[in-house]
Amino acid sequence: MAKNDKVIISCAITGGIHTPSMSDALPVTPDEIATQSIDAAEAGAAIIHLHARDPETGIPTPDPDVFMQFLPRIKQNTDAVINITTGGGLNMSLEERLAAPLRAKPEMCSLNMGSMNFGIYPAADKITDWKHDWEEPYLRATDDFIFRNTFRDIERILKTLGEEHGTRFEHECYDMGHLYNVAHFVDRGLLKPPFFIQSIFGILGGIGADLDNVMFMKRTADRLFGDDYVWSVLAAGRHQMAFTTQAAMLGGSVRVGLEDSLYIAKGKMAKSNAEQVTKIRRIMEDLSLEIATPDEAREMLALKGGDDVGF
């Protein structure tokens, strides 16, 4: 792992997993997404990770026109790195998932490094009062859902976004095999260092939220990538703060945000993304760790810069 003295805080603002009935704080409209992104950046997030939602219903949408309602505003009001999803939402085709990134040509995109079962159906049992008709079937259908990210899909994203537009990637690794998939594309010459490896714990279908697994993932990534990567961790739900704190103590960076967890403490819902950023930043600083600015994150990750994007 690259010897970095500073912690990059990423914030995933809305995602494509949680539904509006789960939390009133989840941003849905372009205005809400922009406002919470700006606040999260002001709180200390160097990278803002973004999905879009239908402003009326809150269902995840791949529509580039919706992204373009908040991307320029975030760029104008912060110097944060803007990171756009290529994962999108359930049942989106690869063409749909790529529509906004190819138009926006961002500095960074997420890139899921393997196909997997992606089960969020247990969450449906916790909600009794639904705001929208789409939410419950959206969640329950994931007992028969495979999140597709084939080698061909990944290669296409690396070539169209990476080689053609200079976008670099947050390589989302939900399991051990996903690290080896990154290494495969390194061996083929389609990926150049530094690699930004986001290890993800606690998604049903991926590696479990066990602290031993954090060490296992890090040791494996160290063996595969040496000093050529920047390591970050996110964990789903109640594991968010504990796992990101452990990662930082091991020299890693961290990701928080309402995409990953709707809570700020046990049994207490977060009021905003910025509240989570403020908390993890305080923990980092209490541990005498320094927080990377957006420009320091750009340097650590060899990004092309905010002036060379399409919005």
Image (cartoon, grey):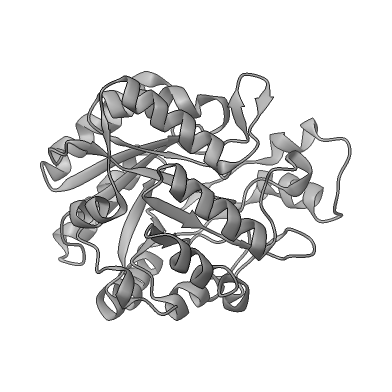
Q: Return the residue nearer the eye: 94 or 10.
A: 10
> Which residue is at 39% across, 75% downward?
105
> Which residue is at 63% across, 48% downward?
17
> Which residue is at 50% across, 25% downward?
239
- Looking at the picture, does residue 13 appear above or below residue 231? below
- Looking at the picture, does residue 5 appear above or below residue 89? above
Q: Is residue 126 left or right of residue 275?
A: right
How many discs appear? 0
Residue 304 occupies quadrant: bottom left
- Residue 295 visible to an observer of this rendering: yes
Q: Is residue 216 left or right of residue 152?
A: left
- Image quarter (top left, top right, bottom left or bottom right) of the N terminus: top left
Residue 122 occupies quadrant: top right
Place of residue 209 in the rendered image (x, y in percent of width and height, measured from the top left):
46, 26
- Residue 209 visible to an observer of this rendering: no
Q: Return the residue nearer the eye: 105 or 217.
A: 105
- Looking at the picture, does residue 6 appear above or below residue 289? below
Q: Is residue 116 left or right of residue 197?
A: right
- Image quarter (top left, top right, bottom left or bottom right) of the C terminus: bottom left
Q: Return the residue nearer the eye: 145 or 66.
A: 66
Place of residue 125 in the rendered image (x, y in percent of width and height, measured from the top left):
79, 32
Place of residue 152 in the rendered image (x, y in percent of width and height, measured from the top left):
37, 69
Q: Return the residue nearer the eye: 102 or 205.
A: 102
> Which residue is at 40% across, 43% downward?
44
Q: Is residue 210 left or right of residue 122?
A: left
Place of residue 18 in the rendered image (x, y in percent of width and height, measured from the top left):
66, 45
